[in-house]
Structures are given as C-alpha cells and as structure tokens.
Image (cartoon, coloured by chain):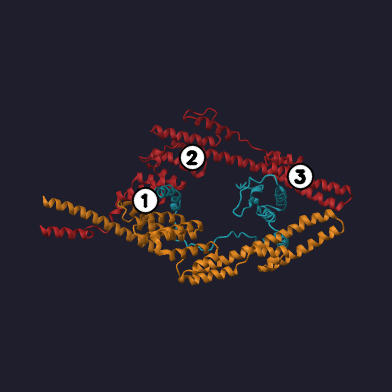
C-alpha cells in the first residue's frame, strides 16, 4: 500500500512527463473560450486571430462568421464584407447577407448594386424585414422617390425617413451663379446670400472704401492715387465675385455633408436595422 | 478600491482600439514634439514664373513678415496662401482667391466657422477655394 | 475504500499540479515572446494565461508583463492601465512599490506632472514605504526635470548622494536658460536688443532698422504738422513693427529655452547611465 502511495505522490510531482508538450491552454475548446472572451472585451484583432487559428485546423462557418464580425467591429468593412459574402450560402447565410449589406454600405457610404439579388433570399421573417428596412433606407439616401413609404418601419421611423427622403430629393441649396451675380451687383451681397454675413459685410465695406478713395482722389485730381485705388477696388471686387461663387458651392457641399452625417448618425443609432443579437452576444 | 476597479472596467474599451492593428516596438522620445511647421525659404521652383513669385514672397517674408509680428490669424498665412493658390491653379484664379482671402482677413465680425489648428490658427487651405476643388471639410 | 480515497486525492493533486505547471509553462512562453520583442503576441499570451488562471495566482505577473509590453510599444496609457491592475494584484510591498514607481515614471514620460507629483506625495505618506524616501525624491527630481523646473530638480537631486551628476546637469541648464521677461525688456528699451541677446542678429538689425526708419517718418510727419500722416504711419506701421519686435524677442527666448531643454533631455536619454523614466 505504502509503495502505491509513494508512487502516486512521486508521479504527481512529475506529471508533466505524462502530458504532451503542447499545453492544454491551446485545445480547440479553450481557444474558442478565450477568443469569445477577447471578442467580448472588444479585443477584436486578437479574437480574430484566435478564431482563424482554430479555423485553420477545424474549418467551421460559425468561426468565419465570428471573424467577419471582428472585422466589422474594427471598422475594417472591406474584410468584413468579404467574409460575409463567402458565407451567404452557408447555414449562417441569412444573417451573413444582412451583415454583408451593412458592411457594404459602411465601406462605400452608398448602396451597392450587387446587394439587390440578396433581398429575395430570406426565409426568416425578422432578417427579411431588417434587410428590407436597411435596403430601403439606403435607397432613400441615394435619392429614390419614396412619397409612399412601405409600412415596414416601427414607431417614428417612417416619419423620420420620410423627412430624410424629402431632404435628399429636394436639398436646400444655393445657386453659385446667383451668388456671383449678386456680388457683381452689390459687393458682398452674394456672401450674405450664402449666409456668410460677416464676410459679406466686410467685402461691402472694403470695396466701398476703396471705391470712395478712388473717386475722391480722381475728384481732387490726384490721378495716380486714383488709379491705384481703382486697381485695388477692382482687385477686391473681382475677389468678392469669385469668392461668392465658391462660397455658394461650399455652402451646398456643407449642406450635403451635414445631411449625410445626420442620416448616418440616425442609421447608426438604429444599428442599421440589424438585430444586435446577430452581431455577437456579450452579456 | 471599488472606484479603481470601476474606472478600470469602464476605461478598458477606450484602450481596446489600440490593438485593432498589430504594432511593434516603439522608442519613447524624451524630447517633446514641437510644432515646427515653418515657412520654406527655398527658392526652388518648377518654372521661371514660380521662381519670380517665390523670390517676391521670400523677400517679403525676410524683410517684413518675419519682423512685423504675428498679424495673420490664418493658416497658411496670406502670402503663403497666394503662392499655393497660384501653384494649384493659375495666376488669375490665384489672384482672385488671394483677393477673397485678403477680404476675409479684414473680417472682424465672425470667424467661428473655421477649424482651429493646433497652433491656434484658423485653418483656411487654398484647396477649399479652387474652382475644381474636390472638397475640404475645414470650414 | 482506502484506495478509492487515495485515488481521489491523487487526481485532485495531479490536476492542481498540472494546472500550475501548464501556467508556469505559459508564463515562460509569454516571457520568451517578450524577450524576442514580440510585444503584441506577448500580450495575447499573457491575456490567455490570465483568462485561464481562475485563482488569479499569476495576476500580478501577467498584468505587469502586459504593462511592460505596452510600454515597449509606446502605448503609455495602456501601460498605466495594466500597471494599476498589477498594483491591485501585488501581494508583496516590494512589488507594490515597484509598480507604483513604474506608474510615476510613465506619468513623467507622458508629461502628467501633477499626477506624478500627487502619486509621489501619496507614497511619501504611506508608512509601508518609509524606507524608500530617497527613491521617491529621486523620481520627484525627474518629474521637475521633465517639467522644465531645473532649479527645483537641482535642489532635489542635491539631497541625494548618488544623483550628483543630475544635480550638476540641472544647474548647468538653469544657467544657460534665458529669462524671457529680461529679453523682452531689452527689446522694449531698444528694438532688436532682445533678438541680439538671443543670438538672432539679422532679425535684430532688421527690427532696429524698421523702428528707426518708421519712428523717424512718424516724428518727421508730426514735426511738419502732417498730423494725419503721422498718425497713420505711427499707428499702422511703427507700432506694428515695434510690437513685432517685442513678440519676436519673446519668441526667440522661448525657442532657445526649448532647444536647451530638449538638448538636455536628449542627452540624458542617450547618455545618462543611472535610473531614468
């Protein structure tokens, strides 16, 4: 009996001799548990590397799906799109198609034409509705006329999207030509038209001052000074007409940018109509 | 101790993004980085006209601009704006852009819609005012 | 029956022992990655160890290693985050002190001077670190040094026998630095003098020339009773160049001081052999 005890105790101290060199921290199950932990800690690159390591030895669509999610979360939309595209016909096809649409939009900030065929490939009603909602929202951004918005949105979303559709279809823009013409008639007025009031008033005062100085000097027969001031008047006048045109153009670009940003913030607040549970469950 | 843990838990997500790209060893420099974006006094130019403009600008900087104090609120300064405008477009468009900028320099009413740079100046790059500009977001 | 119990204890013992060994192997692997300067991977493996180490036996080692890896990668905020975790996990006073000092050093490096100062104050008041006063003073000196307060740094290093070199360096820098108000004052009295004093002779000559010329034109205009011309030249030109002269004098003094500071910091980083942040 004592011999057995001694043997077992001795054995317990040299237990490493019984086990392979590969540490059991690297078994598939443990790696997956570790990868899931990293994913939930938002350490997405390390999580993706762990999932990839498992996937190399034991190919699994759910792992590829997780890798796609990691890239989506890291804002690497190109890679995410590629992973979800590969999975579009797998058993995770439906959520993958939905996330493909989302990645595709986030990559280019506009609707991708190759996503059209995906709309009909849904059996799950929830995913189908989510896909339709996002798809339609993206078409609204592209300026498609939706005066009668289909009843697929919840709560105030229909109203909000209608309002966005109206703004995308009829943006409140300023005419650069009109701005330039206005400033040609009354210096600075083109800038005021583009809501650059301070610059407009300044342009009016500067051009007016040099016009007066020119007139005054010609009037006093100081012709040289008169011509110098006339030249300066023309310089500021021309600059203002040009600047008013550019100001209207920049105003329009700014309006479009603001509207796009507002729309993107709205979509982001709605998680692009994608159910959160398909983007990794971390409770 | 609880507070420390709470801070640790909530601050973690702030750090997570650091590791969204692989990184290598990086030496920490004791020397504090200073913003040394100074003017280029080089007279190197692609054509005689640009050389003429650059010479005029460098002469102006050397004899006047560098000794009359910090008067221009914009980045780049008006003279640099003019040089860059002409280089990016042509002499006529450059002159018009410069005239417009000069007028805006006189504006004492509102300058709140410019992005303020790290050196405390108002970002106003010429690309924003080119006729064929793609778009700058600074204003 | 006895044999069953024996086997049961044996299995428990084996399991514990095996976990301990595999964790130690993992720690050794992590450390080898660190030694090979594969800091990103070292962090991954340290996190793996930390994740499976349910008893948190290796918590101090893993967090310290992660912090050091982040520091090597220049990710100072992340390093402080993990040093703080290591600090919480530290069981020995010695480890606790070392970790706290590492945090202070990083705060000096990332120029969070008041935070480093506050942490040093706290450590000074902590009865566990009464024997470490000299070390705390030493890092306080570095904090002053990085903070550009060379006088205080020299005073602190002067109290530590082993920091005589640092004391001398700080005193030398203090002597070399320009007084900004003195330089500006020189230019108030004589335009361009401050620039001369800081070695910017061309700027000094130009400032002096402009001020003499424009001052002369202003005075001449007033003498000839051309009051409007005098006011325009005086306010729009002379005053502009006079103010430019003052701001330039100040700018040059500040720039020179910055240069002296940076040269010293660079020298210390490359050549100083003692402990440094």
- Classify C271 as above or below A148: below
Q: Is residue A61 visible?
A: no
Nearer to us in this view, C238 or C14? C238
Measuring 65% from the left and 60% from the top, which residue is drawn there? Answer: B39
Please name the color used to draw chain A: red
What secondary structure is marked by label 3? helix
Circle 2 is placed at which residue position? A268
**Residue A92 location (% of width, % of height):** 37, 40
* Residue named by callout 3: A205
Residue C41, horizontal then vertical, whole percent: 38, 57
Identify the residue shown where x is 34% and y is 55%.
C59
**Nearer the camera: disc 3 or disc 1:** 3
Q: Are marks 3 and 1 in contact (CB under 8 Å)?
A: no
State which chain disc 2 sits on: A
For the residues marked 2 and 1, what is the alpha-carbon distance in whole angstroms?
Answer: 28 Å
Report if residue C165 is visible in the image: yes
Residue mark closest to the camera, 2 vs 1 = 2
Task: Characterize the local packing of mark 3: few (<14), some (14-19) or many (20 or more) Cα atoms within 10 angstroms.
Answer: some
Q: Is disc 1 placed on a helix, strand or loop?
A: helix
Residue ID for mark 1? A52
Residue occupying the far right of the picture:
A221
Task: Answer yes or no: are tags 2 and 1 on the same subunit.
Answer: yes
Which quarter of the rendered picture does the N terminus of chain A lie within?
A: bottom left
- Chain B pictured colour: cyan
Quadrant of image for the C terminus of chain A: top left
The colour assigned to chain C within the rendered structure: orange
Chain of the residue on which disc 1 is drawn = A
């Amino acid at each position: 009996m004592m011999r057995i005890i001694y043997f077992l105790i001795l054995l317990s101290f040299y237990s490493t001799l019984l086990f392979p060199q590969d540490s059991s921290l690297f078994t598939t199950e443990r790696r997956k548990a570790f990868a899931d932990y990293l994913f939930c800690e938002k350490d997405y690159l390390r999580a993706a590397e762990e999932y990839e390591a498992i996937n190399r030895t034991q190919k699994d669509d759910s792992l590829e799906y997780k890798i796609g999610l990691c890239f989506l979360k890291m804002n690497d939309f190109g890679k995410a799109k590629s992973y979800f595209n590969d999975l579009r016909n797998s058993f995770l096809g439906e959520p993958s198609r939905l996330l493909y649409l989302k990645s595709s939009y986030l990559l280019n900030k506009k609707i991708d034409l190759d996503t059209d065929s995906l709309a009909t490939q849904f059996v799950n009603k929830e995913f189908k509705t989510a896909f339709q909602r996002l798809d339609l929202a993206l078409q609204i951004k592209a300026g498609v006329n939706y005066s009668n918005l289909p009843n697929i949105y919840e709560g105030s979303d229909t109203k909000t999207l209608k309002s966005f559709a109206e703004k995308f279809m009829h943006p409140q823009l300023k005419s650069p030509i009109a701005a330039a013409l206005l400033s040609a008639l009354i210096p600075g007025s083109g800038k005021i038209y583009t809501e650059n009031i301070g610059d407009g008033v300044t342009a009016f005062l500067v051009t007016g001052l040099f016009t007066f100085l020119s007139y005054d000097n010609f009037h006093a027969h100081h012709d040289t000074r008169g011509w110098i001031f006339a030249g300066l008047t023309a310089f500021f006048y021309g600059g203002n007409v040009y600047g008013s045109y550019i100001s209207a153009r920049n105003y329009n670009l700014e309006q479009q940018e603001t509207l796009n940003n507002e729309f993107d913030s709205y979509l982001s607040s709605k998680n692009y109509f994608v159910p959160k549970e398909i983007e990794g469950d971390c409770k | 101790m609880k507070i420390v843990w709470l801070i640790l838990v909530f601050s973690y997500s702030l750090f997570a993004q650091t590791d969204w790209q692989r990184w290598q060893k990086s030496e920490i420099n004791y020397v504090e980085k200073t913003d040394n974006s100074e003017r280029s006094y080089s007279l190197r130019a692609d054509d005689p006209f640009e050389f003429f403009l650059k010479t005029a600008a460098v002469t102006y900087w050397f004899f006047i601009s560098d000794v009359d104090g910090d008067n221009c609120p914009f980045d780049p300064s008006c003279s640099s704006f003019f040089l860059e405008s002409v280089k990016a477009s042509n002499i006529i468009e450059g002159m018009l852009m410069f005239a417009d900028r000069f007028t805006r320099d006189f504006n004492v009413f509102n300058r709140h819609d410019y992005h303020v740079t790290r050196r405390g100046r108002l970002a106003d790059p010429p690309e924003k005012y080119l006729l064929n500009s793609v778009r700058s977001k600074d204003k | 029956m006895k044999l069953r119990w024996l086997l049961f204890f044996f299995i428990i013992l084996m399991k514990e022992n095996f976990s301990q060994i595999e964790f130690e192997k993992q720690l050794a692997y992590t450390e080898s990655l660190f030694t090979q300067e594969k800091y990103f991977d070292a962090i991954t493996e340290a996190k793996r160890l930390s994740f499976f180490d349910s008893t948190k036996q290796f918590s101090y080692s893993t967090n310290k290693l992660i912090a050091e890896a982040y520091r090597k990668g220049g990710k100072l905020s992340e390093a402080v985050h993990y040093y703080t975790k290591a600090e919480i996990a530290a069981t020995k006073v010695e480890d606790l002190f070392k970790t706290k000092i590492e945090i202070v050093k990083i705060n000096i490096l990332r120029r969070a001077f008041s935070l480093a100062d506050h942490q040093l104050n706290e450590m000074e008041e902590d009865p566990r670190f009464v024997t470490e006063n000299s070390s705390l003073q030493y890092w306080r000196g570095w904090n002053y040094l990085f903070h550009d307060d060379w006088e205080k740094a020299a005073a602190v290093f002067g109290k530590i026998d082993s920091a005589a070199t640092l004391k001398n360096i700080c005193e030398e820098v203090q002597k070399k630095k320009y007084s900004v108000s003195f330089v500006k004052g020189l230019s108030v009295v004589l335009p361009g003098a401050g620039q001369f004093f800081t070695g910017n002779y061309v700027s000094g000559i130009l400032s002096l020339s402009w001020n003499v010329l424009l001052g002369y034109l202003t005075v001449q205009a007033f003498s000839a009773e051309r009051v409007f011309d005098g006011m325009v030249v005086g306010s729009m030109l002379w005053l502009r160049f006079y103010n430019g002269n003052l701001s330039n004098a100040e700018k040059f003094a500040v720039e020179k001081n910055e240069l002296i500071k940076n040269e010293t910091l660079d020298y210390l980083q490359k050549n100083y052999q003692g402990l440094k942040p």
